[in-house]
Each structure stands twice: as C-alpha cells, then as structure tokens.
Amino acid sequence: MADLHRFCRVAAGGAHSLLVTERAEVLAWGSNSHGQVGNDSVEDMLYPTTVVEPGHAQYVFAGRHSSLMIDVDGGLWGWGCNEDGILGAGSGVAKQQVPIKIDTGGQRIRHAAGGWKHFLAVTEDGELLCWGNNDYGQLGDGTQKKRRTPSLTTLPGDARAVIVTAGSYHSLVLTNTGEVLAAGMGYTKAGVQFIQVIRTGVTMVVSGTSHNLALTKTGTVLAWGANDHGQIGNGMLDYQPTPTAVERQQLIIAAGGCQSFCANDIYTVKAWGHGVIPVDDRSFDCPARYSVAEPTEFFIPDGAFAIAAGDDHAVIVGPLGQVGSFGANVCGQVGNNSTTDAGRIMGILPGGTVEILSREDRLAAAMKGPVEEYMLDNGPPDESERRSSGVVLTLGPSVERVPLNAGDGGGVPVIMRQAAGVPVSKDLVSHGPKTAT
C-alpha cells in the first residue's frame, strides 16, 4: 500500500490547510469560519500558525470545514464544524475551535478522512469507523441514519480497511487486497452498503468533491466521477461512471474540489481540472489560471514530494521539506499572509519544515551502503536503476536551489542528516579529539 508518511503529512480542506512538521507539530491556516484552523478563533488565518504543539502529531486529514489529526499514540483528534454533534467529540458546541479528542472506543487509528459533514477512520486492526451525516448512505451502513459518534461499519466479506477517502457525499475504502469499495451519492441506495468499484491492484485512493483517483501498484492513475471541469483527465467533460486510466508511472496522487494532481519518482507534477495551470508561469503577479482536461505538466521549481488539494487551492511539499502553495486565496488558504489569489506556486515555509523520511524509511536506508544510496562522490545515477522507493535519495533537484531552515551541520550533508533522523534545523555538536593541556 501507499506510504502514509508521504500522503498524510499535509492536508487541504475546502479553503484551509494543515501540515505536520518534522517536530511533530500541526500548522494550520486559511478559512476558519467553523473553527477548522483550530486556534481558538473563527477569524481566517492568513499564514501558518501552530495549533498542536511539537511532539504530538503523526498525520492530518481535512474535511470541507473540519480537521482531523492522528497523534503519535494512534489517538484521533478533531476540530471545526460540529453542527448537531457530527464531529463525534461530544463537546456540545457547533464550532469546535480547538482540537479535541474523539472517542474511538480505545481503538488506535492508522488513517482517517473527512467529507462535507461525515467522517471515516481505520483502526490498526483494519476495522472501519464511520460517523456524521448519512443522507446519501455515505456511512456505508445501509441506512440514512446520522451517527454522532464513531461506529463500527462492517465491510463485505472478510475485507479489512487500509485507506479511506471522502468526497462531499460519498466514501471510498481501500482494502488490504487492493479492492476499492464505495458508498454514498452515486453508489448506494437505502438498504445497500458498500459496493465494489475496483476489484484489486490499488495502493491509494483520493477524492475531490464528486470525483476520485486511484493509484495502482504499477503506477497507473485511474479516475472516475464528475468531469464538468475536466477533473477526470480523459480529454472530455462528460461524467465518467467507471475508472479509466489517465496517466502512468506515477508515485503520488491528490484530488480536491474539481482538480487533480499526480507526481512521479523524480517529483515532476502534472495537473488537470479546474483552474490548475497559471496563465503566466513567469510572474507571481498574475493570479489568473485556466482549466485543462488532460494531465498537463505543471512547473514547480523543485518538484513535489507530497501534494494536498482543496476546493480551489493546493499545498505542495518539496523534496527537501520546503512548502509552497497556490490557487484561490480569499480566506488566506495559500498561507502567504495575503488574500490575493496566487496564479503560481508561492513559497511559504523553508526546507526542513516537513520530515521527508519516516522512521521506517530511515531504518531501511540504514541497512544500505551509504556510497551506493547517497551518491557520495559516486557520479551520476544510472537512469535504468531508478526506483519508486521512499528510501532512494538519489533523485530530484540539487539541494543548492532550495533554501534550507538548517542549523550547523558540521559538514554533514542534509540528506545524510535526514536519513539518520537528525532534524535539519538542529546544530550538530563536534566531538573531535581533545587538545592536550
């Protein structure tokens, strides 16, 4: 399955953004009409602000007006829209303005998702929890009954959930066998639970408002659903009822609103759908963007390690942990301390902000020879040996072009410091030979 560390450190809601830093804190910014930023306010936040202190956060997820976080112990937290108690936190307020623990019955959570006003979570044992609105059967329980607390939903057969994603009124579940199940608007009726959309072979699924993307284990991007702005990427504007291949040899996918993105193992980004391509990619002053109905290469100076897409904006994490954003900005969701739309990507946080290598990747990298993996005076990489692995560090742009928020490394390369689990921002202390006295 997909590397959750890569997909779940950044998230975008309707018009707000979330990020987990290398210090395991949560930064948030953008629309705050329902308290979804989480800073004990309902005023929009125009730049990243800390809402969860360092040392606590593992992953973040965003609904349209809500935010979710999985902490380092597997606990689930939520904030934002809580009308009629749909957030599942039992706080009794319509706008939950600070993170609050959600009772999952003692179950540790490994993945989660939020839609317009419904939520999904996957336990460590692969069980599916659903709650919130259920007007269209999006909770997958065969009813239209609202749930105000996370409740177990049974999947067909012996399926175990791995990944979940939510559109406005529908839900997708990726199972441990690579199967994709769907429920809600366009999929199920009263009395019908989850139905199969893709039989096997999928490693990741994401959803926009009413369209979906799936990534197969061979790197093929499949798309289906609404297509009024070309968000499917098949060159047409007609509704696409079944998954169709639109791009190949990709490593990550993202969807939000009516826009879609993917990137490959050398961080090259392609985009399609509503307003994804800048009219003038040479100017920061031109906010105009246009729509395309096929995957179109989108120039980002250093490429994308991770992407999160909102209704009309996107947040990009670069290959050295730097963060940029572009798109609609009326609520400050771009995060550049402005409310002027950004027609092309704007840098908002420096390199080293996001941890690129997970603990598991660092352990895997430590088992490999440093010369072969880290290219220390080892010449250019062999194009035939490029792999789509999170621990291959020889890919991507040169570090000289990326501004780093780095401490004194004592001559140790940034990549080596990340592989060793040392924060880039930390000064390294020399322990050389002592001078005789």
Image (spheres, helix red, strand yellow):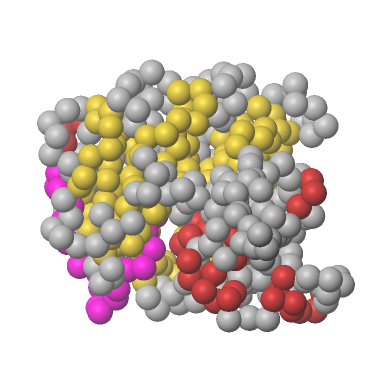
Q: Is 390 drawn above or below residue 51 in the view shown?
A: below
* Residue in the image at 48% along x and 60% along y: 5
* Residue in the image at 79% along x and 55% along y: 398
Residue 155 within the magenta-colored segment of the rendering = yes
The region drawn magenta spans 145-171
Front-most of residues 32 and 39: 39
Quadrant assignment, res 157: bottom left
Task: Say if residue 16 shows up in the picture.
Answer: no
Which residue extends farthest right?
Answer: 379
Front-most of residues 135 and 11: 11
User: Residue 381 location in percent, x, y?
Assistant: 82, 73
User: Residue 113 location in percent, x, y?
Assistant: 35, 51
Q: Is 109 drawn above or below residue 367 in the view shown?
A: above
Q: Is 195 drawn above or below residue 339 in the view shown?
A: below
Query: Total label count?
Result: 0
Q: Is residue 139 left or right of residue 379?
A: left
Quadrant assignment, res 313: top right
* Residue in the image at 34% along x and 31% along y: 38
User: Residue 125 location in percent, x, y?
Assistant: 25, 72
Q: Is residue 417 left or right of residue 85?
A: right
Residue 315 within the magenta-colored segment of the rendering = no
Task: Say if residue 336 shows up in the picture.
Answer: yes
Image quarter (top left, top right, bottom left or bottom right) of the C terminus: bottom right
Front-most of residues 355 and 221: 355
* Residue in the image at 13% along x and 39% along y: 90
User: Residue 168 location in percent, x, y?
Assistant: 37, 42
